[in-house]
Amino acid sequence: MKKYKNILLSLVLFLIIGVCNVKAAELTDLKATLKKSAELKNSYQDLYVEVTSDNFSENDYRALFSKSTDNIPTNVSNGEELSFVSISLDNRKIGEIQDYLKYASQYGNLYITLYEYNGSSFDKASSPILIERPSYLPYTYRIVSQFYSDKSASFKINEIYNENSTIKFKIGEVKDIELLKKFSNTSNLPYEELIEYAKNDLTPIQINQVKINSRNSGIADGEFTDVYDTTNIVDGRYYYVYTEIDTESGIYYPLVDIGLYKSQYNKNLISSNYKNDSEYESNSKETDEDIDIKDEAIQNVNVPDTASSNNIIYIIIGIVLVIIGISLILIPLIKFKIKNTKDSI
């Protein structure tokens, strides 16, 4: 009898140990896709990862973002190290992960691995899946900045960034006439050349930086006061504004932007090639006036206005012709009148 009791006890212990060590069923059909929650044009602030599988259990799932597939743990005891996965309750086939921006700002391309809760810790439930970083947004849309006559400035980041980042900016006058002329061709704006011009400018008007303290829908704390030095800014001239996210020695993925600005309305720097989309309308101090660089770029860098000179010449020629025409008519009349006067005498 004692023998049977020992056998029964061994079986119970074996079952208990087996249950406690049940591994999560691997989600072999798992797919991960980068999605946008809204139709924000030229903005990545609504990106998230959608995961789909027909084999989600009723357990809680978490996600691990990593830069590579190396050293992926098979079990994680502390769930706070993982990102929460919100799985739809109606069909248990679709899940959303909202922490993508946080990790993509560091890794660029990254991998995502899902973990399933086993009652005390999280077991690896999928192989790592690559999520490629989207291409950079066009220049002037990545970090939208405006500078105002009261020395304040505003920054709006539409790109992927970390909410604790620092924006560094550099302002300088564009004195290269040929470079400005190229901006008249709106189909191929020379931003790469403008970036090189800014990088090689050894005497910029200003270099400064601002600290972002919250994501706040992409706005870097709205306006920053007393960060824009207007001392050497002259209305009517063109300036570059070079902005970049401080990578902090490689911690964050590099992000730079460039824009061509014109000083107007008492030293407000207004972008000459960026027009606000309806989604980005905020407390901007600029007017809705469009800046036509085709007409203004040349005259604002002191290039002689040959068109005006030609107009003056044409006007002078016209006046001379009119005088000659009038003379040809009046002279015969005067002669005729003098002749009649003599005959009458």
Image (cartoon, grey):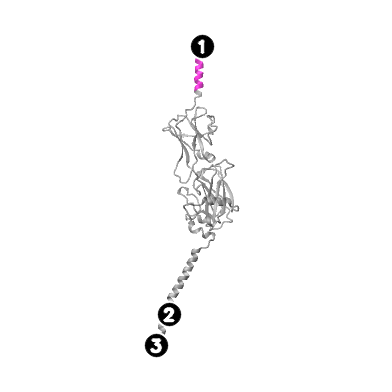
In the rendered view, tell whether residue 305 sits above or below residue 128.
Answer: below
Residue 315 in the image: x percent, y percent?
47, 69
* Element class at badge 3: helix
The outermost residue toward the top is 1
Location of mark 3 (residue): 343
Crowding near the residue tagged with mark 1, few <14, some 14–19, many ≥20 C-alpha atoms within 10 Å: few
Q: Which quarter of the picture shows residue 55?
A: top left
Residue stretch rendered in magenta on the structure:
5-18
In magenta segment, residue 235: no
Residue 83 lies, in percent from the top left, at 51, 35
Q: Which comes before the other along the chain, label 3 or label 2?
A: 2
Q: Can you identify the residue that label 2 sits on? A: 331
Residue furthest to the bottom: 345
For the C terminus, the quadrant is bottom left
Q: Nearer the viewer, mark 3 or mark 1?
A: 3
Sequence-first disc among 2 and 1: 1
Check disc 3: other Cα within 10 Å, few if <14, some if 14-19, many if 20+: few
The answer to whether residue 263 is seen in the rendering is no
Q: Is residue 13 magenta?
A: yes
How many numbered discs sit on the rendered protein? 3
State which quadrant residue 318 falls in.
Answer: bottom left
What is the three-letter code of the residue carrying label 1?
Lys
Q: Does residue 343 appear in the picture of this structure?
A: yes
Disc 2/disc 1 C-alpha distance (Å): 148 Å
Q: Foreground: 72 or 166?
A: 72
Q: Position of residue 272 (x, y in %)?
A: 50, 54
For mark 1, give the secondary structure: helix
